[in-house]
Image (cartoon, rainbow, N blue to C red):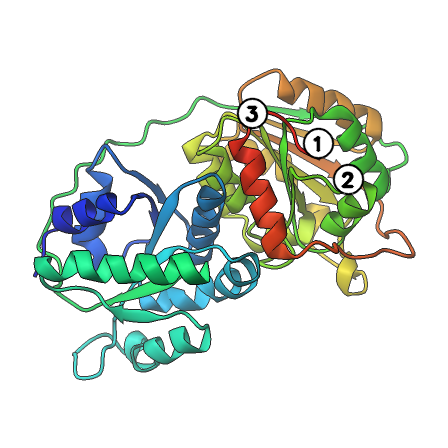
Amino acid sequence: MIEASQFIAAGQARGFGFYSGVPCSFLTALINGVIGDSSLRYIGAVNEGDAVAIAAGAWLAGQKTVVMCQNSGLGNAVSPLTSLNFPFRIPTLFITTWRGQPGLKDEPQHELMGQITGRLLDEMRIPWRSFPKEAAALAPALAEADAVMAESRLPFAFVMEKDTVTDTDLDEPVRATLPPGYYRDASLGGERPTRIAALERFLATIPDRVGVIATTGKSGRELFTLADRHQHLYQVGSMGCASSMGLGVALNSDRPIAVIDGDGAALMRMGAFATVGAYQPKNLIHIVLDNGVHDSTGGQATVSASVDFARIAVACGYRTGVLADDLAGFEITLKDAARSSGPHFVHLRILPGSLEKLGRPTVSPREVADRFRTFLASDTPQR
């Protein structure tokens, strides 16, 4: 067995300082060690897919990242691992436990995943090794993982067996109750704008120094059509992960960050609202353009008609949440958000539909990630 501090020190020697994850009893000692180390940052995610997306955002902002979860959570992480990390070539050190390991007496819900954990990683083209059980093996194992990730720009996994890390006490402060945020209904009941009109107003309102993450689907496609800029990241896959990715970026960057979300995507991973609210990124503006349908797949209705996203966001800890239904209210809300500390939430109800002849980004996801990363690290806007 090893001590959590030994893994942490070996990881720090290779630059790993940002962790995100979801607890597992096999991981308790390591997660407790990470939480208790003030030189590290640990973001507790509400699900494993969000943890992957948070780490992806942190990597874009210059961090070397580690994601930790139970192997049952691999199912939750498949979407971002395959449709975010893979196309954008975003590496992360992925530590998953081996619940249900053949020969190990475990709970029945872990039996199947225990049998297929290695094969699932193989199918996702994620190279993996057993998590080191001896201190002397840590440095070589991390050196191998680091080298593979540096060459491939893709995740590398360690699979942790039971009783690998010695017990570590939890030293975690009690999370304080946040003061209530401010909710405002700025809707006037007028004619709703189209998404393209809302994006045009957004681009005309925000400063060039703002980094923009656009959710998968037509939001990113229309944004690209209007203006392709280095500070734009078009999240072509991993539906629902835009806000978590934005959180990872915002926590590691001094730049203001805007997330352009859709109602269907926001509903898919609405637990991320709570994570954003809890970690309070002051530089984040989260915008949901709500047309009530899944526009990219034929216009099937979402359930957003009965959802007040802004009120939910405020209840989750956002500083402000505003509902608007016209461009004037949208613009005023964006300007107000830019003048105060966030996180801010803007819910704009829009019309369904999009441009008739709508192209797709012609820049590869890897190039988009590279130029966005360069933009975040630079002092001046780049077009």
What count of labels does the image hold? 3
- Residue depicted at x 13% and y 46%: 5
Q: Position of residue 118 (x, y in %)?
A: 33, 77
* N-terminal label among 1 and 2: 1
| Side of 48 relative to 235 (left or right) | left
Q: Residue furthest top?
A: 339
Note whether residue 264 is visible.
yes
Against 84, residue 368 (above or below) is above
Dot label at residue 379: 3
| Crowd band around label 3 with a 10 angstrom C-alpha radius: few (<14), some (14–19), many (20+) | few
Secondary structure of the residue carrying tag 3 is loop
Tags 1 and 2 touching, CB below 8 Å: yes
Which residue, given by chain and number where applicable, does mark 1 sit on?
323
| Crowd band around label 2 with a 10 angstrom C-alpha radius: few (<14), some (14–19), many (20+) | many
Q: Position of residue 286 (x, y in %)?
A: 61, 36
Which residue, given by chain and number where applicable, does mark 2 sit on?
349
